[in-house]
Amino acid sequence: MEKNSSVENNKKTWSGRFNEPVSELVERYTASIGFDQRLAEYDIQGSLAHAQMLAAQGIISNGDWIAIEQGLHQIRDEIRNHQFIWSQALEDVHLNIEKRLTTLVGDAGKRLHTARSRNDQVATDIRLFLRASIDEIIALIKAMQSALLDLAEQHIHTVMPGFTHLQVAQPISFGHHLMAYFEMLKRDIGRLIDCRKRVNQLPLGAAALAGTSYPIKRELVAELLGFESVCENSLDAVSDRDFAIEFSACAALIMTHLSRMSEEFILWMNPSFGFIQLADRFCTGSSIMPQKKNPDVPELVRGKTGRINGHLVALLTLMKAQPLAYNKDNQEDKEPLFDTVDTLMDTLRIYADMLTGVRVNSKMMRQSALRGYATATDLADYLTKKGIPFRDAHEIVARTVQFSEQKGCDLSQLELSELKTFSAQIEADIFAVLTLEGSMQSRRHTGGTAPEQVQAAIHQARKWLS
Ligand code: ARG
């Protein structure tokens, strides 16, 4: 980027009434070109639609529109080919492009900004950027979900201990566990689709804040840019960034879900669990401890979630004390938003790939479930079905577990005679209930962990995805 100081550079677009130029520091402090040049494609898209409408309404001539269109196309090429020279003195992406347009096509370029302000322009740019980002993020979530389904399908019958309080609770199918994340991501997509509706509204026409006296046709611009509708109030259109905040909240939730999964992967990779291995390409070694294989990628996902949550809070805080309408504070919306989009996209990409390389140690999962008396609830349910009130059954099973613990074996390894000392109601059919598989298979209602249900859930999920 050119860092011409304002003194030697051409005059500011807005400096007509100013007596002295801004200092180099103020210029640097107030400029957004360092980060908002990323919006260039959307800025050009918005300008093309605006200019086309101006011509259609007879506000500018057809000749001006043709010149503007050609000029903007050339600028788009220059930017794509990295030939465009960005200038800090020109503050932001909007003024950089407008200045170049005027250099290229003269007065027609100066007419582009008729009936428009940078306030409605920038709000439009961000909405276009966010709409495209949302579409890409939804596609990335779906790719990850697809990888999740492949892994879940391989492990419908793999038994693992389900946890509450991170203590062994009840045996579940590993496929069922993975499908929990599918559901979270499905809701995340629902939230993004909902958020997209509120992003997809056109601010242009609001001008600086009060609208414009030109006979504009906002509906035409909305149609050209694929917006569902126009923002209904000009002050609101230029000033609120609630759509960006809402998107950030969606992103924070997605990252939170991925962070939870990361936490589990990290735990499961610890040899005390030994449930899974991640492919080497997602791990690193230690420079001092040769035995180490560290789950860096999930750790970073967990860490980056903090950053995304931070961006959400930053945007909320940015907005909270702003009087109507536009304030320069809003220029600060971009960096958190861009970083949120970039971090989220990379995280989703890496996760889809990482899931394909998960190796499962089903023996360890099984052993862990056996060690934790995971079928104790099944024994209680068995007794309840024989007429013993659940609270009494609970008590009986607690004593049975204590006994197994002393004996150092699982409930299913006790003799029938031993079991009978705790309740005369226990018969030989108890052993079908006390096995991990028996317990799992008995939960065969919708949403349960029985393999046939997990299979059905995966089938439904595939249909939903396609
Ligand atoms: N760079 C500014 C932003 O990001 C563009 C809008 C500037 N408007 C203004 N009146 N100074 O918000």
Image: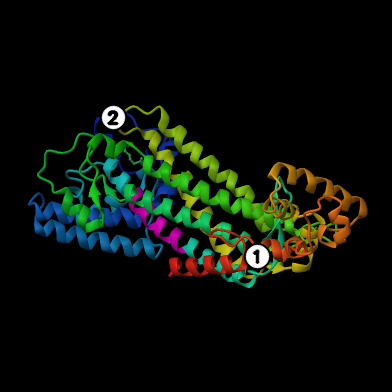
Task: Return the residue at label 2.
Answer: 18
| Residue at 79%, 46% in the rendered image | 396
Instruction: Establish if 398 lies above or below 361.
Output: above
Amino acid, disc 1: Gln
| Residue at 44%, 63% in the rendered image | 139
The quadrant in which the C terminus is found is: bottom left
Task: Return the residue at label 1.
Answer: 441
Which is nearer the N-term, disc 1 or disc 2?
2
| Region in magenta | 126-139
Q: Percent from the top left, x then y, of residue 436? A: 73, 63
Q: Nearer the viewer, mark 1 or mark 2?
A: 1
Residue reaching furthest right?
Answer: 407
| Residue 43 located left or right of residue 346 | left
Amino acid, disc 2: Phe
Q: Percent from the top left, x then y, of residue 401? A: 83, 50
Task: Tell me which secondary structure the magenta stretch mostly adopts.
Answer: helix
Residue closest to the eye, 444 or 243: 444
Residue closest to the eye, 262 or 70: 262
